[in-house]
Image (cartoon, grey):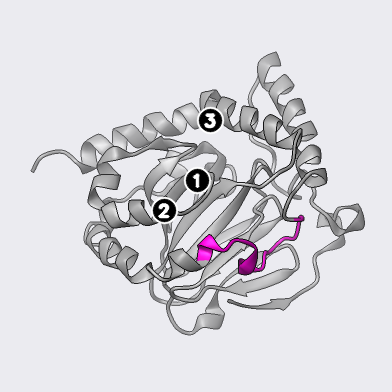
Amino acid sequence: MSDMAQETPPALQAQGGGQVFATAGIAPLERHGWRFRIFAAIIQGAERLNLRYSKVGNPSVYDNAVFPWALDIEREWRAICMELESVLVRKEELPEFHDIASDIASISKAPGWKTFLLVAYGVKSERNIALCPQTWRILQKVPGLKSAMFSIFEPGKHLPAHRGPYNGLLRFHLGLIVPEPRDQVAIRVADRICHWEEGRALIFDDAYEHEAWNKTDKLRVILFVDFVKPLRFPASAVNWLILNIAVFTPFIREGYSKHRQWERSFHKEK
């Protein structure tokens, strides 16, 4: 991974250069009702706890050495690529991410970001996993694994600046297909621009504002993983509770329903 710094607009900076709890220009995902308002307030309090009680600090982009298991996954990246090849044979049948996840639709409804989901918030896609058993085996090396998928950026795709919904998770990317020229395929996290490399991990906190782009004329594919942020008590207990309650929230339940519908079509007998 290589990176270079660029200035973050002042309007997007938090006091002291830390995380902010919204993204300028993007409205939060709205849900009506007192239950959602209470849950949103709890999330804001939990995020502050997570910053205070982190075991690994709160940088926007991590040194991979902080997570020794990342090297174990890098060593097996070619095995993952072999299974990816069979998935890409049916690329046109894969769903656009915004068609599955309503929170993504709030960021961008433009086509060009396709996904092949293996697990989301701890709920497995057994049929997809059956097509990628080696990838699933390798993913078991990730402590606190919550979500994993193949993330496919079509040529010309740009994902606008946004922040993730909650800072109790960290994000792991493994470069699988990274086209040339490499400087045209990148992700900005806060004030750093990072370039994916095939077989190399990139670990960052998606609660910082970030955006990504593929300005080449070829596909970019990564293994995209969310895992539980290492925290000290009491933040660890609150985080466990929130992540286990999250599966019952409306936008995640809607995503499960849409993904099951796509699965039935994709895996139907020919």
Residue bearing the label numbered 2 = 139
**Residue 216 pos. (x, y %):** 46, 77
Look at label 1 and name its amino acid: Leu
- Of 3 and 141, the residue lying toward us: 141
Mark 3 or mark 2, which is nearer to you?
2
SS state under label 2: helix
User: Which residue is rendered at x = 26% and y = 51% of the image?
Assistant: 93
Mark 3 or mark 1, which is nearer to you?
1
User: What whole-number distance in Å separates the C-alpha atoms at marks 1 and 2?
Assistant: 8 Å
Residue bearing the label numbered 1 = 145
SS state under label 1: strand
Residue bearing the label numbered 3 = 251
User: Which residue is rendered at x = 19% and y = 41% of the image?
Assistant: 267
94 magenta-colored: no
* Circle nearer the N terminus (3, 2): 2
Residue 33 visible, this angle: no
Left or right, residue 155 beside residue 196 = left
* Circle nearer the N terminus (1, 2): 2
Based on the displayed image, in which of its 4 quarters is residue 260 positioned? Answer: top left
Q: Which mark is residue 26?
A: none
Residue lying farthest top? 34
Relative vertical location of residue 206 with respect to residue 258 in this rendering, above or below: below
| Label 3 CA crowd tier, 10 Å (few <14, some 14–19, many 20+) | some
